[in-house]
Amino acid sequence: MFSRESAAPWLRGAVLGALLGALFLGVGGRAAMRAIGSLQGAPPGFSIGGTTTVVLLGAASGLAAGLIYVTCRRLLQRHQWWARGLFAVILLGVTLRGLRPVDSQRLIIFLPLFVAFGFALDRVWEGRQRRPQSVSEGVS
């Protein structure tokens, strides 16, 4: 039913999304939460359990976003700018849905993380797609 070639983009999207999600959404999200706490006068501190949870949720969110990214690119194969735009709109919608309550402080702190995540996912994906063939691969 599925060949290795047809499953490869989905697997790559899931893995890239999870790794970048853990970094940008997880670690970055944890730092953003700490920044909000500091702005609200909370005493500084981290817990291993809380940090692990946030990083794992970032990875899970990134995995889902990676699959959405691949879906957008597959649906709009001939119009990659439209695919990127659709992905950006979906990512923005999910981000705004997840920020509760939505206020200027949370938007200023969290929105750049999602923009950076989406940009990094696209750049890493494009880098993998446009990698030049080595001399030995190009010679027959």
Image: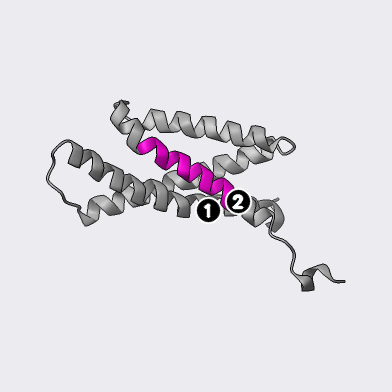
Disc number for residue 16: 1
Disc number for residue 125: 2
Mark 2, residues whose alpha carbon is within 10 Å: few (<14), some, or many (≥20)?
some
Q: CA distance from mark 2 to mark 1?
A: 8 Å
Residue 2 left/right relative to 46: right
| Residue 51 screen position, x and y as percent | 27, 52
Mark 2 or 1: the one toward you: 2
Residue 74 left/right relative to 91: right
Q: Nearer the viewer, residue 123 or 16?
A: 123
Quick one: which residue is furthest to the bottom in this view?
A: 136
| Residue 116 screen position, x and y as percent | 46, 44
Residue at disc 1, secondary structure: helix
**Residue located at (40% from left, 35% from top):** 111
**Residue located at (65% from left, 32% from top):** 82
- State the predominant SS element of the stretch in magenta: helix
Q: Is residue 3 visible?
A: no
Query: Within the magenta stretch, is there residue 139?
Result: no
Q: Which residues are magenta?
A: 110-125
Q: Nearer the viewer, residue 57 or 95?
A: 95
Amino acid tagged 1: Leu
Disc number for residue 62: none
Query: Within the magenta stretch, is there residue 121?
Result: yes
Amino acid tagged 2: Trp
Mark 1, residues whose alpha carbon is within 10 Å: few (<14), some, or many (≥20)?
many
**Residue located at (64% from left, 35% from top):** 83
| Residue 5 screen position, x and y as percent | 71, 56
Mark earlier in primary sequence (2, 1): 1
Q: Where, quadrant-wise, is the C terminus in this rendering?
A: bottom right
Q: Is residue 117 visible?
A: yes
Examine the image and state in which quarter residue 113 appears.
top left
| Residue 137 screen position, x and y as percent | 78, 70
Residue 40 left/right relative to 64: left
